[in-house]
Image (cartoon, rainbow, N blue to C red):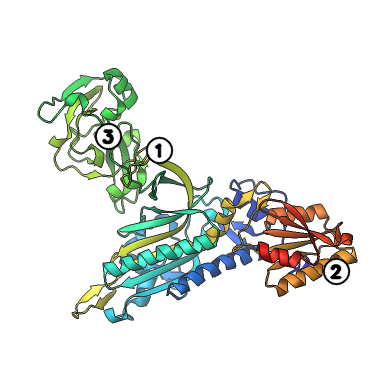
């Protein structure tokens, strides 16, 4: 391909709202352009990269034995109502009506539609397992689309769904997909970690995320310095914090007392007043839980030196979302802000206590009375308590797998795999006959990769201050032949010969033959666009020499015309 034949509108200026390098460089280098909020067009170079990533994903999935299909982008709302997700997906799911008034959605994901496809078509255990995938457009009506392709509303996604006769076989496929995903991201040249994750609106019994490590990532990942443990902070766990038995207190000698703590509403104030560590106190976090048909004030209790992890808290009460409770909410619920504790709560209050506080004695907490706290509490005396993992793992906490130190890093979610079980097959009536002729719901897994997001992800991990640095599997062209002055016939002729020789050698190449572009502008475009290598045909041509430039290192090497193709073969 020749520059003079391609639509590559590069620019020096980035959009004002473009904060991430990938957003800036993909637009400046002419890979994408914005059509609307969270909506992007792929221009020629962008489409080449998107197709190359898609091809890697497809090849590895086909090698793993999956079958490709393509489902309708528009699906009937009735399928989502049957599964119970019509409301749970919330406002992210864009709903439309056709001319007859029938309700449809623009697919944000396709569990329901894929179950409906297999339902009544696979009826016996003898026909299982079945694993179907598609690489298709999805739409999620993000409240705040941002960061370019990272969080758009319309995107290209690979989603696949496996159907099994047993939990064991589903887990086998789940493990196979984990290994397949590792191959995909390794081929794309990405540094990543596989981490335990929250299953969110997809649901199921367990899930793993594939996080590409990048400082610009939205997700906080907890990893161990000593072993392979990794988890999204929404699902991360730790070894229980070791806390001394305060003053050797036990359930037998404990004595709860109410203490005047006038005007002291914070953990720090109360701890300083009582000369106790924060870890010896119970922190109350008051939230308003939003459900499908109601909302209520909920209280979460964690240790005083811990922080509430909101996704865990949301799961603990099975809410759609949690909002901060305002003063009126707290007053209406009969609670006292700053003095809330798990003892003597109003009877109608829903509350959850963190797992690590179970059976603790000697802690300080609010007395549910203004200006008073309890000391010497005994949590074993509480009845009908719901305990749940509520805390956000902090840096320096101890790994429960090996005893190593846990640290935080940032990552971009590039893939997510789920063990669904019968979450969708059961409500949708998708059954098969087992070995005994008994009807059972399919056991399912689901597996996703953000294909268009990967375009931006590669740039986030591979760039410098000049522009993109594409990996070999993702580069739109491997080599950019830069003819310094295309008006000089000898330079253009030499450039064309190298171009044709590289094409014959099977190396994807673009020839920058632009007549009206100066050499400096062509070099800037090379650096901005990020082709792995450039061949500069210029002032050393009379000596039979050209220059090879490595985009990653920007190192230059003079090579004879006769050796340039062989040299590039070795490099590539």
Q: Quadrant of residue 456?
A: bottom right
Task: Tell me which label, 2 or 3, sits earlier in the chain.
Answer: 3
Q: Secondary structure at mark 1?
A: loop
- In which quadrant will I find the N terminus? bottom right
Instruction: Check contact, mark 1 vs mark 2: CB within 8 A.
Output: no
Q: Which mark is residue 42?
A: none
Q: Is residue 325 above or below residue 179?
A: above
Q: Report x, y in % for residue 224.
A: 40, 45
* Disc 1: which residue: 395
CA distance separating discs 1 and 2: 60 Å
Classify 10 Å Cα crowding around label 2: few (below 14), some (14-19), many (20 and above): some
Q: Is residue 302 above or below residue 158?
A: above
Q: Secondary structure at mark 3?
A: loop
- In which quadrant will I find the C terminus? bottom right
Count of labels shown?
A: 3
Q: Residue at x 74, y 67 (%)?
A: 565
Q: Which mark is residue 242?
A: 3
CA distance separating discs 2 and 3: 74 Å
Instruction: Check contact, mark 3 vs mark 1: CB within 8 A.
Output: no
* Disc 2: which residue: 493
The residue nearer to you, when weighing 557 against 90, is: 557
Q: Residue at x 39, y 73 (%)?
A: 131
Q: Is residue 410 visible?
A: yes
Residue at the farthest left position: 252
Q: Secondary structure at mark 2?
A: helix
Q: Report x, y in % for residue 183.
A: 48, 64
Task: Tell me which label, 1 or 2, sits earlier in the chain.
Answer: 1
């Amino acid at each position: 391909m020749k520059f003079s034949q391609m639509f590559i509108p590069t620019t020096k200026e980035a959009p004002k709202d473009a904060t991430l390098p990938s957003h800036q460089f993909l637009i400046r280098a002419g890979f994408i352009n914005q059509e609307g909020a969270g909506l992007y067009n792929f221009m020629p170079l962008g489409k080449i990269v998107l197709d190359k990533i898609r091809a890697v994903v497809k090849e590895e999935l086909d090698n793993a034995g999956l079958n490709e299909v393509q489902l309708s982008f528009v699906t009937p709302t009735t399928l989502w109502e049957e599964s119970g997700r019509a409301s749970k997906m919330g406002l992210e799911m864009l709903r439309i009506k056709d001319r007859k008034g029938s309700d449809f959605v623009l697919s944000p994901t396709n569990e329901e539609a894929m179950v409906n496809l297999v339902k009544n078509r696979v009826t016996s255990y003898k026909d299982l397992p079945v694993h179907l995938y598609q690489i298709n457009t999805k739409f999620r009506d993000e409240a705040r689309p941002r960061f370019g392709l990272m969080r758009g509303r319309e995107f290209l996604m690979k989603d696949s769904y496996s159907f099994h006769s047993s939990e064991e076989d589903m887990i086998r496929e789940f493990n196979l997909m984990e290994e397949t995903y590792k191959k995909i991201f390794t081929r794309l040249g990405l540094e990543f970690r596989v981490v335990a994750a929250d299953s969110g609106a997809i649901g199921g019994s367990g899930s793993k995320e594939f996080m590409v490590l990048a400082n610009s990532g939205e997700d906080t990942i907890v990893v161990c310095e000593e072993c392979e443990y990794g988890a999204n902070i929404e699902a991360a766990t730790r070894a229980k914090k070791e806390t001394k038995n305060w003053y050797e207190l036990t359930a037998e000698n404990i004595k709860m007392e109410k203490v005047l703590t006038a005007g002291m509403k914070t953990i720090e104030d109360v701890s300083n007043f009582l000369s106790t560590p924060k870890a010896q106190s119970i922190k109350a976090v008051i939230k308003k839980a939003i459900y499908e048909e109601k909302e209520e004030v909920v209280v979460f209790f964690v240790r005083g030196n811990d922080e509430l992890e909101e996704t865990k808290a949301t799961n603990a009460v099975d809410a759609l979302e949690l909002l901060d409770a305002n003063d009126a909410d707290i007053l209406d619920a009969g609670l006292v802000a700053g003095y809330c504790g798990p003892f003597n709560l109003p009877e109608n209050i829903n509350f959850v206590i963190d797992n690590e506080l179970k059976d603790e004695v000697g802690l300080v907490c609010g007395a549910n009375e203004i200006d008073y706290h309890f000391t010497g509490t005994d949590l074993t005396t509480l009845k009908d308590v719901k305990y749940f993992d509520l805390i956000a793992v902090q840096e320096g906490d101890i790994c429960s797998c090996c005893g190593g130190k846990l640290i935080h890093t940032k990552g971009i979610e590039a893939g997510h795999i789920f063990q669904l079980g019968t979450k969708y097959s059961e409500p949708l009536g998708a059954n098969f006959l087992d070995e005994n002729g008994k009807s059972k719901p399919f056991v399912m897994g689901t597996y996703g990769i953000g294909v268009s997001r990967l375009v931006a992800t590669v740039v986030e991990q591979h760039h410098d201050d000049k522009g993109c640095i594409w990996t070999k599997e993702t580069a739109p062209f491997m080599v950019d032949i830069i003819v310094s002055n295309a008006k000089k016939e000898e330079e253009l002729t030499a450039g064309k010969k190298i171009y044709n020789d590289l094409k014959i050698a099977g190396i994807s190449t673009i020839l920058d033959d632009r007549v009206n572009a100066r050499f400096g502008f062509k070099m800037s475009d090379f650096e901005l666009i990020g082709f792995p290598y450039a061949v500069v045909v210029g002032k050393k041509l009379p000596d039979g020499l050209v220059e090879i430039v490595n985009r990653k290192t920007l190192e230059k090497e003079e090579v004879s015309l006769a050796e340039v193709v062989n040299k590039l073969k070795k490099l590539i």
